[in-house]
Amino acid sequence: MTNPAPESIAPSLALIEELAREAIATLPAVFRGPATAIRLRIEDFAPEEMLEALDLTDPFELTGLYEGVPMTEKSVMDQPLQPDTIWLFRRAILDEWAERGDVSIAELVTHVTIHELAHHFGWSDDDIATIDPWWE
């Protein structure tokens, strides 16, 4: 049996993380520094407790999630309880990618990553559109 061609293999957790880190590396400098301090977690699916907390029953509905306190709500007096984290869910991302059929996996991972960063930075929709022209 021959090995499958690389383009026929579903992107791995490691590749999804690499694409997310590349998206962060291309941010304007003012956002790049703080964004690199956010922990990235790449999993196949959201944990059951997370889905329950969001009132979701289908794990394919959640491609990413920001877990933390937005910068606009943080105080220097606050003690962090846990690191700010961006979760990306590979199987849900792959499902959306396959359904769309009109974007690359890199474009979709970038979009999801930027959207989750928006929650961290407290960005408006206009801010997101400036950084990520997904909606154009």
Image (cartoon, rainbow, N blue to C red):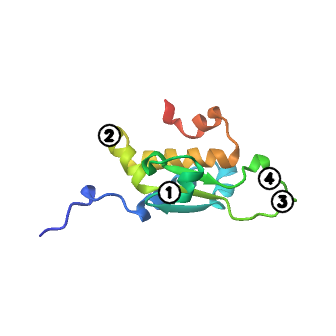
Q: Earlier in the sequence, mark 4 or mark 1?
A: 1
CA distance for labels 2 and 4: 39 Å
Please state which amino acid type lies under the numbered disc 1.
Answer: Ala
Tag 1–tag 3 contact (CB < 8 Å): no
> Depth-wise, is mark 1 or mark 3 nearer the camera?
1
Residue at the far bottom: name it: 1
- Residue 19 percent coordinates (x, y): 46, 56
Label 4 and label 1: CA atoms lie apart by 26 Å
**Of all residues shown, which one is farthest toward the left?**
1
Q: In percent of the image, x 49 and y 36: which residue is there?
A: 134
Query: Disc 3 marks which amino acid?
Result: Asp
The alpha-carbon separation of the residues under discs 1 and 3 comes to: 28 Å
Q: Are marks 4 and 1 in contact (CB under 8 Å)?
A: no
Name the N-terminal-most of marks 2 and 4: 4
Q: For the residue labelled by badge 4, is the local secondary structure a helix, a strand or a loop?
A: loop
- The residue beneath circle 1 is 46
Q: Secondary structure at mark 2?
A: loop
Asked whether the residues under the numbered discs 4 and 3 touch, taking CB atoms below 8 Å apart as contact, a structural biologist would say yes
Residue 21 visible in this rendered orientation of the protein: no
Q: Residue at x 51, y 47 (%)?
A: 56
Where in the figure is residue 130, as x and y percent of width and height? 60, 36
**For this view, does 64 lie left or right of residue 95?**
right
Give the residue type that dot 4 points to: Lys
